[in-house]
Image: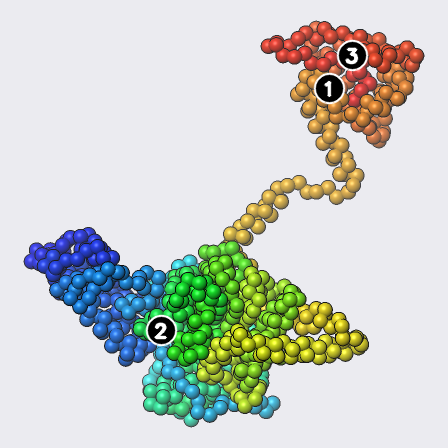
Amino acid sequence: MFPALETELKQQTLSEPYEDFMCHHLQYYGYFKAERGSLPNSATHQHVWKKNTRYLLSGSFGETEDLILDPLQKEKSLWPTCLSSTVHRQIEAVSRDSLMLSSPLLKSRQLLHDNLGEVNSGLREPRDLFAFFSSSGPLQAPRWPIECEVIKENIHHIEWVPPQPEYFYQPTGNEKVPEIVGEEKGTVVYQLDSVPTEGSYFTSSRVGGKRGIIKEPAVTLQGPEDDTLLFESRFESGNLQKAVRVNTYEYELTLRTDLYTNKHTQWFYFRVQNARKDVTYRFTIVNLLKPKSLYTIGMKPLMYSQLDASTHSIGWRREGNEIRYYRNSTDDGQQPFYCLTWTIQFPHDQDTCFFAHFYPYTYTDLQCFLLSVANSPVQSQFCKLQTLCRSLAGNTVYLLTITNPARTPQEAAAKKAVVLTARVHPGESNGSWMMKGFLDFILSNSPDAQLLRDIFIFKVVPMLNPDGVIVGNYRCSLAGRDLNRHYKTLLKESFPCIWHTRNMIKRLLEEREVLLYCDFHGHSRKSNIFLYGCNNSDRKFWLHERVFPLMLSKNAPDKFSFHSCNFKVQKCKEGTGRVVMWRMGILNSYTVESTFGGSTLGNKRDTHFTPEDLKSLGYHVCDTLLDFCDPDRTKFMQCLAELKELLQQEIHKKFKELGQDMDLEGSWSDVSLSDIESSTSGSDSSLSDGLPVHLLNTADELNQKKKMYKKKKRKPLQSRKQRNKQYQKSNLMQESKLTEDAPEGAGFASTLQKQPAFFKNSENTSSSMMKNEKPRLNELNGRDKGTSLGPSKMTTLILTKNKERMQREKPGFTVSRSPKRNTNPSQEPAPNTKPNWSRNRYPATKGGRTTAVVYPSLHIYTYP
């Protein structure tokens, strides 16, 4: 089938593929050592790989399939822009020492060898067994839903700190409010068609997203004089659905909703090309959903120029004028939309620029950072990188365990744990920048960092929702749901990241105390950095949950606002990580919120936050943790006393607003803290609660089946008269059926057993009621006149009818009747004497069965 391959195999002495695989497998784990002659020549082996279709590896983005011999070469080809020169040198060094190259002696990677090639009595630590990254491992290319088109270009931005503070735009009140024109009167210059719509759900993913040729959604320029802007957002974390040109230099932009939903439009990140210098452009985003935004107080969008980055090392910066946030006047009647408009002048001609809601931090950025940590000979000693789980799309959710090795088992067991997570909401990239600042410090050689690693075990999940980050969602995962409302979920397959995180913390709590839980977020309506906590009901630790945020506000006074913190536990937030971890037993459980805008405090008042500001907050978390755990409890007690004083002032203020006077000298500490605080101003994700999108169809089918089943059932009776009539009819039918199916004596006995109270009454009643049957017939006739029959009368009627029917069906069988009972009470039998009833009226049953109890036939007409 492959002549060239067969010829090559005949010319070279190669082992069988299975033997070759087993050879490498066994020697990797230290069970096999061989000389060069017993192994295939590396050059020949590589040549065979190139020609044998079984070994071809599919390309990451293109349609052609290229062989990559070494995973590190694949890493370099996929991620050339995100790796530093140091990492490249490490990759080349590892490639030279690769196992596939020829060597005089193949050695095990697990057994320790000395310089002479002798095996020492010991094994290496199995780093690659749990760690995802290693010096010889590749980066994982992001996996996209198969509906998403992805361009082949690698987008990378440099980090840069503005030399001067970036102040907010000061609204004048005269900003223009553009009229929304739409595509009816404008020209669509960019539109994505292959976007999952509402009602669809995630099915599968692949590296590179949608198969086939990537469509060009932008217009084709007619020549060098064509000044139409070219838009693009089909890259990692990009979000732009449509662009409409409504004037020469004016464009209306529509953001893509979170995949598989019809809501959550806030995050934007897109590219613009073919711009002209010194021309004022206007961009208007027309489908934002939040009625309030920091843009109303002057927050500016971010812009990035590639020419400035390459020539002047200038990165993201705040730009924009005539910024206005207002309600869209062209509502469709379903939900109101809001618009953001701003003007901009590009710094260069023919430049490539990017716009974003906040500083992007992508999944690839995280992987590059983690690769540098894994390749560091120092950091890798106390930072173990593991795979917590795989997301819905198959992307890795990373777990970092950071601690210094303990000298004794007792020292290891005494360590408390600290858990930090970020990016459960993918559009809140400020959470990643705070997390990066924390990791930069805790992995450094600072004495404080070393001390923290000595006394704590840090469990860090830096990106909880990688799928959402990759596709450019603002709030949801590929399940179409807000993960921060599903920490109590039992749906492991639908919410794997959240389920495994909670399970990891649950196991950790079984081993040791978890002192602190922090989940890093972003906030779109409030300034500064603050946090949400949970009021503690245990009087022993009263107000202790507020000590850490108060200390943090003292360590970062120009960024962190303690007065913006809130500790009320609302019912709608029961599924958040903060509340779930608090109910699991973590007293200091917080959601750390960072604004998308800037600060209103201290020297940073009215200025935007930069990535450095957010990273410094990560450092302050470490610094505050040392203060919080200081054996000298002076700081702790001072903060606790200050908190009590602040709370007293807040209570007085609350009662003053209510117009009440209250002496709080002795009872103020008994006031419920939840009654004092207002509700948090977090985002309302109630519309994103419930089942994941892919299970909604199943739920709808079940609901339809229930409706069909209800339709088949009879309609319920409305009036009481109808219900009573139906009840009596059903009782008659049931009694009639039981009497027909059962033998005469047994049926009569069961009837007696059903009416035990009647025997007591019958003993005291006069036997004059049984003198004749005419009153019974009159009662039967009265039934047709609307007279109701009692239970005893009904039973008498049924039994009488059955006896008559049986006599008609069996002529030879006659019903004998005893004489009527004497009504004279003086002639009644003595109480201790048994009635002289005949016991041979009915022959014994066949088969040796016991004889049924027989009663006089007279009772047929008297007993129910």
Number of the front mark, 3 or 2:
2
- Mark identifier at residue 379: 2
- On the image, the x and y values in percent for residue 590 come to 55, 70
- Within-10-Å neighbours for mark 3: few <14, some 14–19, many 20+: some
Q: Secondary structure at mark 2?
A: helix
Is residue 355 visible to the viewer in this orientation of the structure? yes
Amino acid type, residue under disc 3 in the picture: Pro
* Residue 378 or residue 854, whichever sits in front: 378
In the displayed orientation, state which residue is furthest to the left.
11
Among the two numbered marks 3 and 2 on one chain, the one whose residue lies closer to the N terminus: 2
- On the image, the x and y values in percent for residue 42 come to 14, 64
Amino acid type, residue under disc 1 in the picture: Ala
Report, in whole angstroms, how far the alpha carbon at label 2 lies from the one at label 1: 89 Å
Q: Secondary structure at mark 1?
A: helix
Residue 194 lies in quadrant: bottom left
Report, in whole angstroms, how far the alpha carbon at label 3 lies from the one at label 2: 101 Å
Tell me the residue at 70%/28% (across/down).
734
Provide the residue designation for mark 1: 749
Provide the residue designation for mark 3: 856
Among the two numbered marks 1 and 3 on one chain, the one whose residue lies closer to the N terminus: 1
Is residue 239 visible to the viewer in this orientation of the structure? no
* Residue 17 or residue 743, whichever sits in front: 17
Quarter of the rendering occupied by the C terminus:
top right
Tell me the residue at 55%/68% (across/down).
589
